[in-house]
Image (cartoon, helix red, strand yellow):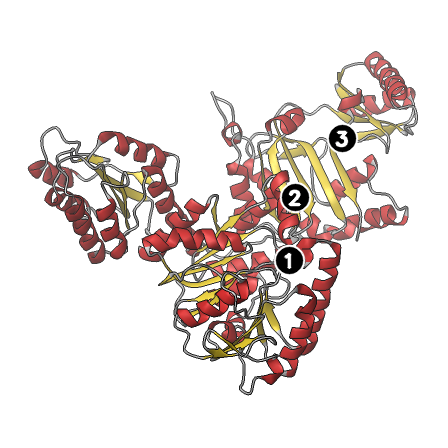
Amino acid sequence: MKYTSDNIFHMLNNFFNPKSIAVIGASRTPGKVGYDILKNIIQYGFQGAVYPINPSATEILEKKSYPSLLDVPGKIDLAVVVVPSKNVLEVIEQCGAKKIDSAIIITAGFKESGIEGAKLENELIKKAQELGVRFIGPNCLGMIDTHSKINASFAAGMPAKGSIGFFSQSGALCLAVLDRALPDEIGFSKFISMGNKADITDTDIMLALSEDENTKVILGYIEGVSDGRKFMEVASQVSKKKPLIILKSGITSAGAKAASSHTGALAGREAAFDSAFKQSGVIRAHTINELFNYALAFANQPLPQGPNVAIITNSGGPGILAADACDKSDLQLIPLYKDIVDELRSFLPPVASFYNPIDILGDSSADRYERALNTVLKDERINGLMVLLTPTAVVDVEATALAVANISHLIDRPILTSFMGKKSVESGTKILMKYGVPNYSFPEEMVSSLNAMYRYHLWINRPEKHYPRFNGLKEKAVQIFDTVKKENRDRLYELEVHYVLHAYGFNQPKSLFARTSEEAVAAAKGIGYPVVMKIISPQIIHKSDIGGVKVNLNSKKDVENAFFDITTHVRNIMPTAHIYGVMIQEMIPKGKEVIMGITKDLQFGHMIMFGLGGIYVEVLKDVSFRIVPLGQEDAHEMIRETKTFPLLRGVRGEAEADIEAIEKSLLILSQMAMDFPQIIETDINPLMVRQRGEGAVAIDARFTIGGE
């Protein structure tokens, strides 16, 4: 589905470009929120009409005050609500009567405060919808638009005008980001505190900022999302237009609990958000500092058109740190052309390093930096340049900064810098900031930011995803799922699992069901030795954990003994378990064991999991996830994300595993999840992957269903 961002932008016009603002709950007392908001609106140059609303005052901050919205004679575009929570619904009713369609509800005391607050918030949503009032909040800091000169917030300060749009679910984080931005004069276009997101959500704001001509980069802080699917669809749409950089909190169980109590947000599983971001082009920041680092790079420099980078430094140590960081990223330090190296030799000292990183030594002047930069940039293969400076006694920091800035303006390739230190380089970093060259205190931050830019270049140039469709699979399995639903079960029996996997084209070991030892022997003879024996019981999920599996049975005696051992052992451990019999399966030759499965997330729906299989999956936790539906590219990437992927490629003379068979299996599982939404969890463990071209065999599997 394509969301109409231009319509959203128009809908929010009275938030961003109002001609008149009313502050309901305006106060005469400095330090109160109602006072600070009114003062900010007036102080920072809003050109429209301002109406304080306070029944106990006739004038506030030299503005005539009115008892209620209904007493204001003129038209009001935007209402800023700062009254106690119990009075908010009355104010919204007045907004409806006054034909005010836009409101910012600063007031707290809604769903973040508990059950009664949640009830009040639901009433607020219903009332606002009835009256056609859209609102930001409640429980928020407010909103700032630097280009319209609106500061409808209780923040202490106004950011500089710029091209970074920022939205946040946390008002306190807005304050922290603003405080961090003010000293360095980092410019913002819009600054929006979302609060509880009861009406206007982060997806609405993302769409609006994607259409805002004053916004070049979109930053966000979220604790959770109300509609995971919509978030992904909107993020995919927005991120193709502008960089979308998001900091997500609540990634631990403690953080998720805190997020829930903070704004009533469902934090969701970390794996789900990580997958959602990857699949929708969101650039993930893991800290506030990283959020700023990325924002400065995207807002001020062109994107690199490839991974090839060069480093110029006046100190070997920082150059090595930057090189190490590049090695861990997608960037590549390529050797320079011989003629470039020869030109560097012509003016650099003989003991300099002429390769990459290029160490121009600690006594470098601004002229030496400038010549080195211009020389390296003659190599058209270089897609981005990083400049390191340590403040030696002889370096002219300001002159070097100016030289870098001037070169940056003449080229269409990104230049990022790391003038290391604080006090000694401060004058230079201010020059760099003034001319739009991002500077970082440490080399690793610089490399990480340029790498984020390169990865975004790959995203916006990525071809449309291909979603393979396998026809005629669902029909063969419908009856199984219908039967399980009618019998009100939450798990599929062993034979049902076998039939479902068969319907979806998974290769399985030859299998025969046996209720007695005699039947087991006959089954083994029919399949051919060696065989595997597995207990069949609806109460037993993990058969190996209770001794319910015997492998490598090579004779009639082995089978008879195994049948007795398994059934006796299981009855002793689980006397209430209903044992149907055993499954006799062919012994599959060894291959690479992997696990794949389906799991259901509350916010994003079904996810597909892949990782190293067998008994070690829960110990190693080397798994990757993607949200359904999977494209061909998703299956390809999630296999290669795992640390154990090299084992599939073959090590020390081993043959390569059939990776194409794994990809196809992942895509089929994705289709199965879409075909049967009632699936809550599926594990195929292990999927035994044979050599390239020989396919894979699903050795064991389980299904849990429910809900739909």
Neighbourhood count class around disc 3 (C-alpha, 10 Å): few under 14, some 14–19, many 20 upward:
some
User: From the viewer's perspective, is 215 left or right of 229?
Assistant: left
**How busy is the neighbourhood of tag 2: few (under 14 within 10 Å), some, or many (20 plus)?**
some
Question: Label 2 near label 1: C-beta < 8 Å?
Answer: no
- Which residue has dot 2 on it? 257
Kind of residue indicated by mark 3: Lys
Q: Residue at x 61, y 63 (%)?
A: 107
Name the front one of labels 1 and 3.
1
Seen at 51% across and 76% down, the residue is 14
- Examine the image and state in which quarter residue 623 appears: top right
- With 469 as the anchor, is 390 left or right in this view? left
**Amino acid type, label 1:** Asp
Neighbor class of circle 1 (other Cα within 10 Å; few <14, some 14-19, many 20+) is some
Residue labelled with disc 1: 227
- Check disc 3 and report the residue beneath it: 510
State the image coordinates of residue 666 (x, y, percent, origin top left). Answer: 62, 43
Q: Vertically, is 297 above or below 251? A: below
Residue 664, visible in the rendered structure:
no
Q: Earlier in the sequence, mark 1 or mark 2?
A: 1
